[in-house]
Image (cartoon, helix red, strand yellow):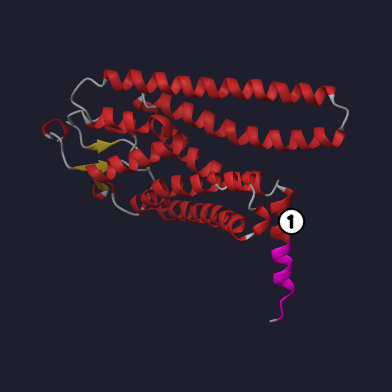
Amino acid sequence: MDNLTFNSPVFQLEGLTVSEQNLYPTFLFFLVFYLLIMVSNIGIILLITMERSLHEPMYILFCNLPFNDVFGNSVVVPRIMMDIIRPTSERYISYAECVTQAFCYHIYTCASHTILMVALTIRLNRCGTRIANPFCDNASLFKLSCENPYINNVYGLTYTAAVLGTSLGSIVVTYAKIASVCLTSKNKSLNSKALKTCSTHLTVYLIMWLSGFIMVTLHRFSGYAEYRKGAALLVHIGPGILNPLIYALQSTEIRNIMLRILHSKKLMPL
């Protein structure tokens, strides 16, 4: 069927492989985590927006992180939930919707080269119609091509290697400097705070880095599709849940305001 199709306007999403007895528990799992991500991240944005004492450059810039998590998860997770309760044969997505989702997904993960990367893909003629992924991304799209996607592969792998390598290198240098300062400093309170902040930040970073590396690598090996899908989902759900806990609750100002709001509500008369 795929070989007879040329530039089809409709694709079929492979989605997640879920047994019938696990269908609704899986749907509930994604629903709960999606609601947690939305409530926690939107709550932080509203808190910073409404609290005048937080109208400082640091907290305004901090709003970018929860906004990014809301955007990235909204692009992917609702569609995955809808497809979970649909039969595999009915998981269709239009070409325009697929390209839009791929564009938004890469804006979330690596914005700087998204336009060129997606442009290189949509120029290709398509012979396939099946997206071997729970959602549309650039690699899934150019796999449908009946032309040689050599340029896409070279560009994508080169850029990904450069981004992941540069990111990892900068993290190593930064944490090495922090470690050297902590080792030479005799301020135990400062060292404890630095260790707590850096360890949690490093945890989220490693989740994203390893998940992204696994996802990109396993796109080249069709036999590990389920592991690739898991890594792709972890890129979204993991940071979306952990970022509010790590960056908001570790901020003394934000934590104190949240506690004050909760305390004032407890004291309100019924």
Residue matched to label 1? 256
Q: Is residue 54 left or right of residue 191?
A: left
The crowding category of the residue bearing disc 1, from other C-alpha atoms within 10 Å (few below 14, some 14 to 19, many at least 20), is few
218 over 45 or under it: above or below: above
Foreground of the two, 226 or 254: 254
- Residue type marked 1: Asn
| Image quadrant in which the N terminus is located | top left
38 over 246 or under it: above or below: below
Q: Give the prevailing secondary structure in the magenta stretch.
A: helix
Foreground of the two, 234 or 124: 124
Q: Is residue 264 magenta?
A: yes
Q: Is residue 174 left or right of residue 239?
A: right
Q: Is residue 219 magenta?
A: no
Instruction: Look at the image and give the residue range highlighted in magenta.
Output: 260-269
Q: How many marks?
A: 1
Q: Is residue 207 left or right of residue 85?
A: right
The residue located at (87%, 32%) in the rendering is 187
The residue located at (38%, 32%) in the rendering is 225
